[in-house]
Amino acid sequence: MTAATPLPAALTGRLLGDTSWGITHRVEKQALDPTALLTSATVRRMLDASLLKWPYFTLLKHGEVPTVSSYTTKRDVIGHKAAGFADPRAVARHMAAGASLKLNQIGDWHRPTRAIARQLEELLPVAVNSYVFHTPRESRGMLPHRDAAHVLAIQLEGRKEWHLYAEPDQVGASAGLDVDAARPTHVFTLEPGDVLYLPHGWPHDAVARGGDSLHLTFTLTEPTPEDLVDALLRRFLDDEHNLVHHFHTRPLAARTAEVRSALTRRAETLDGDHWARTALETMREAIG
């Protein structure tokens, strides 16, 4: 496979710059060579000959997830039967019936995707995850939904029709399926080499048109208030050794007062950039 060139600076500037980031969606037509990334032939080889195992992949049909055992099989691994490996024939049957194949965290095993994810994390204060959707013609894997992240999608093969539901009362901070899909605000079709950016929480869905579709998606997650609080607590637990390990020597009232003072002091003195970096490091470690 051809090694992926990181996304060109001009492209990331247009897609993720101040005029678009968090404000509006953007589509860049014929922005890159999709053959330098993943192909459906590579996906088929992975299913046929690799040790691809659930939950690195799953199936979706209009938001429904088939029973895992219906598309996985057991393999003999050094004398032990291990479950969850891809059953290529069963996967093909599900896809023939309209199910989409979703590959999760492909940056863990696909070097070109990992290179782009790392580039995005160098450019932006985000934790990046990566997915591939292989969708049969006239089908969709997921119902209209919001992601609790910004989204960058690259069309690799085929055509996919996207519907956005970007009314202000539908855009939200959290992921969810509570989307009124009666009147999309935007409808457009991505073709191979097209790249789409969606701001955080913009509801959307997508349908393969005219044949099978293959696209690569990156979710770009910024630290939430909860992530920042977790980072503050992480710093607190690292720095307040005496209080953390000898709290039992203090009466509860004194213990409460000391914790309050220590937390307040940490919040007031912790450098904002360092605080955000700590949160991002934790988020990125969780992704792996």
Image: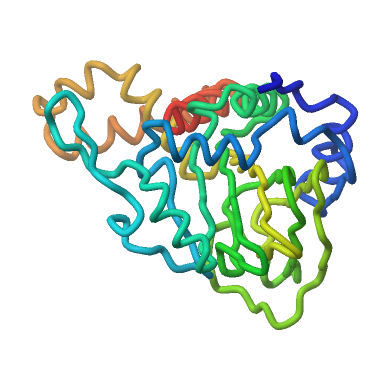
In the foreground, 142 or 100: 100
Q: Which residue is pictured at 55% across the width and 39% down the height?
A: 43
- Left/right placement of residue 174 relative to residue 257 reads right
Report the front residue among 58 and 280.
Answer: 58
Q: Is residue 204 visible?
A: no
Residue 192 percent coordinates (x, y): 80, 45
Drawn side of residue 267 relative to residue 154, left or right? left
Horizontal relation, residue 9 to residue 6: left or right: right
Residue beneath the point at 89% across and 41% down? 30
Q: Is residue 283 visible?
A: yes
Which quadrant: the C terminus? top left
From the viewer's perspective, is residue 282 above or below residue 43? above
Residue 256 location, quadrant: top left
The one nearer the camera, 95 or 253, is 95
Whole-percent x and y of residue 139?
62, 67
Front in this rendered view, residue 79 or 150:
79
Q: Residue at x 57, y 69 (%)?
A: 143
What residue lies at 67% left-to-right and 70% top-to-bottom? 170
Q: On the image, which quarter does residue 249 sit in?
A: top left
Q: Where residue 244 sits in the image (x, y, percent)?
A: 22, 24
Q: Say above or below: 81 vs 138.
A: above
| Quadrant containing the N terminus in the rendered view | top right
How many discs appear?
0
